[in-house]
Image: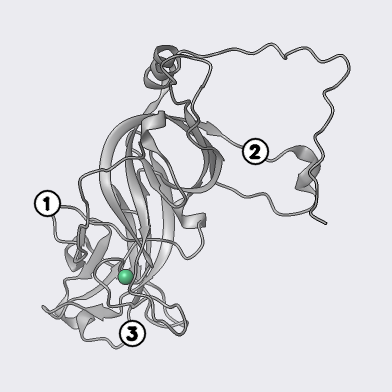
Amino acid sequence: MAKTIEIGETPVNYTPTPRIDFTKSEYEKAIWDNGYDVVYEKAMRCSCKSREGGENLPSCRNCGGSGWFWVNPKLTRMLLEQQTLKAQYQAFGFERPGHVSITALPAEELSFMDRITVNDARSYHTEVVFLDFANTDGKKTGRLIYPPISVEAVFLFVSPLSPMTKLEDTKYSLVGNLLSIEDPEINKLEQISISIRYCFAPAYHVIKENRTSMITRTLSDKPKMPVNVTGELAHYTFDQQNAYYNDTVQTHLFDNSYVNNNCK
Ligand SMILES: [Zn+2]
């Protein structure tokens, strides 16, 4: 016998819950007035995956081996707020750092792994970069997680028993997030790893969609409601995505941007 679907009873004392219907102009104005200037880029998975293991090709100039590429950078405004876990959950797992709640205009259609860079904010980061790939010009290169705004220090690792060698600015160059060694002697070394500390504009990836674009059906013009997602600072995001490109500079990755075809 086919299953019948029980229809839940309406609560006895049911009265419609009071609700507020926002009008488009009010909430869009609130986001615009209080938001930060951001660059919003859409994420896409890169199809350079192998059929067997699902690994992406390190030599791929679409994703730089990260498995993702970002397209259609757009300057817009979004609200960003600190997001903390509720106290009762803190004892049961580690607190995820670097999370923010991001509210955007409905037109932005935010999705998983999209990248939001906050232009006017500054943060510091340190990381180790393995300079394994030699460009056609013989310079060893490696990609940072963020494109630095300014570099505080770069150290070359020599051996566990000797001090780091601090590299002068002339010994390396930066184009976007691509670091190249400019010193012919260092480029001759077999395995090069450097430590770097730098200043950057924080970039967040969408890791959770809390409220996707909704249509308010009670209003005649059916306005879409703002979108809310959880963003995570890129260096906490799994696999540390680091594919950046820039039309004006050569970062050795392709720009696959296209004309937007938004959801109707
Ligand atoms: Zn790829």
**Which numbered tag is attached to residue 84?**
2
| First along the sequence among labels 1 and 2 | 2
Up/down of 104 relative to 46, above or below: above
Seen as rendered, the residue at the extreme front is: 1
Residue at (73, 13) in percent of width and height: 16
What residue do we see at 84% from left, 28% from top?
9
Q: Quadrant of ligand 1?
A: bottom left
Which label number is shown at residue 195? none
Check disc 1 and report its element: helix, strand or loop: loop
Is 166 on the left or on the right of 123, as rendered?
Answer: left
* Residue 142 drawn at (x, y percent): 29, 70
Q: Position of residue 194 (x, y in %)?
A: 35, 71
Q: Secondary structure at mark 2?
A: loop
Please state which amino acid type lies under the numbered disc 2.
Thr
Q: Give left or right: position of 183 versus 147.
A: left
Q: Which residue does the numbered mark 3 point to in the structure image?
A: 191
The residue furthest right is 12
Mark-to-mark CA distance, 1 and 2: 38 Å
Q: Tell me the quadrant of the picture where the C terminus can be found.
A: top left
Q: Given the image, on which type of amino acid does mark 3 rest?
A: Gln
Query: Which residue in the structure is indicated by mark 1?
Result: 248
Q: Quadrant of residue 155?
A: bottom left
**Type of residue at label 1?**
Thr
